[in-house]
Image (tube, rainbow, N blue to C red):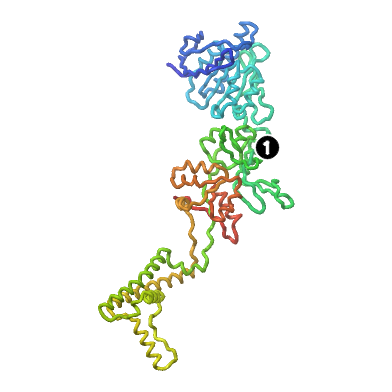
Amino acid sequence: MRIPIIMWVMWTAAGDKTGKIILQNTTVSHRNVSNLDLKHQGYSATSLRHPRGHIATPLGSEEQGEEWHGSLGRMLTHIAVREMSQCNLVMAYDSGYESQHVLQPLLALPNPRQVGCRGYLLLLSRPTPLLTLSEARPLLWDYRGRYLCVLPSRGDLEKLAGSLKGRKTEHLAGVIKGESVGAWQVYVNQLYRGDQLVGRVATWRGRRFISGGAIYRDRVADLKGTTLKVLCVLVSINLSSLQSPSSGHLASSTTGSLNGSVLFRYGTDIGVLDTIARVMNFTVRYEEPPQGERWGREEENGTWSGMMGRLARNEVDIGLVDLYVTHVRIGILDYTTPYDSELSCFMARTEPPLPRWQALAFPFQGTTWMAIAVGLVVAGPVLALLARGSALCGDEEASLQSLGVSWYYALGLHCCEAQGKEQERGGGRGELEKDKSDWSEKIPRMQSTRVFVATLWIYTIILTIVYSTNLTAFLLVAKPPATIETIKDLHASGLEVSGVGKFYGDALGSASDPYLKSLQQKFRAYVEAAEIFPRVLRGSAVMIQNSPFLEFVAATRFATRGQSRMRLMKVTG
């Protein structure tokens, strides 16, 4: 039966200190290997001389060298069996440890029945490639693996433990040579212990551990009062303008003038961190981001600004912030288990009520008013043409044949005013007979003209009744102003989309919804939320941010007598 055991990683170095890495999948028979022949055991290895002046393993004699290597091989095998039995093992070694006494016991290990972790055995007499890798890009590292590094000195272990990746690796152990023959000392990294990067946990001599216990134990459960630096990426809150319900702090001086000093911190995030600190036994030292920097973004040169940059550079231990999960950030940060979720939405101003003087126009929409105007303009000429045509066929009222009189006649019908109305002027009988004559002269005489006037009367009566009824209703119930409620409405409005930082602009550009994606062209980034609020109140912009923050801002900062000048839009398209 052939069982996959180890992926060999050969670190080779030429005389000019340049090197290369060779990866090779290896399978060996499940049996004891009595004679380790690196050239004929189903795998290959390359032995190159070390750089000039470098001695791989300073040994007093060949017998002592075999004793050193035999002791090391037995120790590595013991640790692998005891604490890596469920791990998929990966080995890296250079020519300094190209010995059958070191490699043979490891090759005889059985294949694990299940893979519960990943273990890394790094046997390097020249640690420069490993130290270089530990300072390379964050993606090139397994932060959750169990590392066992055999290195020349404690100084090399401290460099590895203090590197960019070593500071964030929980299970990082190192082995260096002891003073007596066959003795090896095991060190582990001290997480969050400041300048104390490594500490000795066990000593091996010959065939057994003479001191110490488990190497890969949980060293995070009790941090023994260690102080952790926590970066609070929080919106500043003051006594006159409260903001942010989930994580914030109240900034004010004792005299009431705002000077940026922190009175106290509150919120869900602060409470969660305080609970974790009590359980894991560490203290918290809060820090604030520099002015103008918060979450941070990747710059053109590959570095990060803000909270992302400070965490990546190990300047702080924890970032306390509402941070969206992206595939880029996952490669740099280690997120906690989610305990809350928030959606992004848009905040727009609450449109003020329409002026009461506009109530005369409320009963009809603009298209209706346009149709009435067209009808009024057309009615006059049509009536004049009918009157002139009727005059050719018979006797028709002469005044109706005038275009001006016909327009005035049609306008009177639209206003429900009778034409040629009999008037009592208090004069004699002669004046009353004259008024009746004037009234009778404006009545159409021909049948065709009378039909048109009667139809116009019915139309204007219906129009007047509808208008009066709607006007009464609008006077009793205020009409709500037109508002932007959907993404489609926002797309058509042409308003600016404002946000703190450039993150939301990039997020809009990656959206699948075409209306939402188009908003990236209207997006503008600001440093502070206070710069955005006046633009939203003027109705020239909407603000995008997480919904709890916007709800809190709208309810506390811009509310008067229970009515807020800000509102949250619907999120549908």
Q: Which one is nearer the viewer's eye here, 388 or 348?
A: 388
Q: Which residue is mark 1?
A: 283
The residue positioned farthest toward the right in the image shown: 255
Expressed as whole percent of the image width and height from the top left, the position of residue 392 reads: 26, 77
Q: Label 1: few (<14), some or many (≥20) within 10 Å?
A: some
Expressed as whole percent of the image width and height from the top left, the position of residue 412 reads: 40, 76
The image quadrant of residue 97 is: top right
The image quadrant of residue 397 is: bottom left
Check the image and report above or below for 414 versus 135: below
Check the image and report above or below for 9 versus 294: above
Q: Secondary structure at mark 1?
A: strand
Q: Which one is nearer the viewer's eye here, 94 or 498?
A: 498
- The residue sitting at 57% across, 38% down in the picture is 297
- The residue sitting at 48% across, 47% down in the picture is 519
Determine if residue 230 is in view. yes
Check the image and report above or below for 86 versus 99: below
The tally of labels here is 1
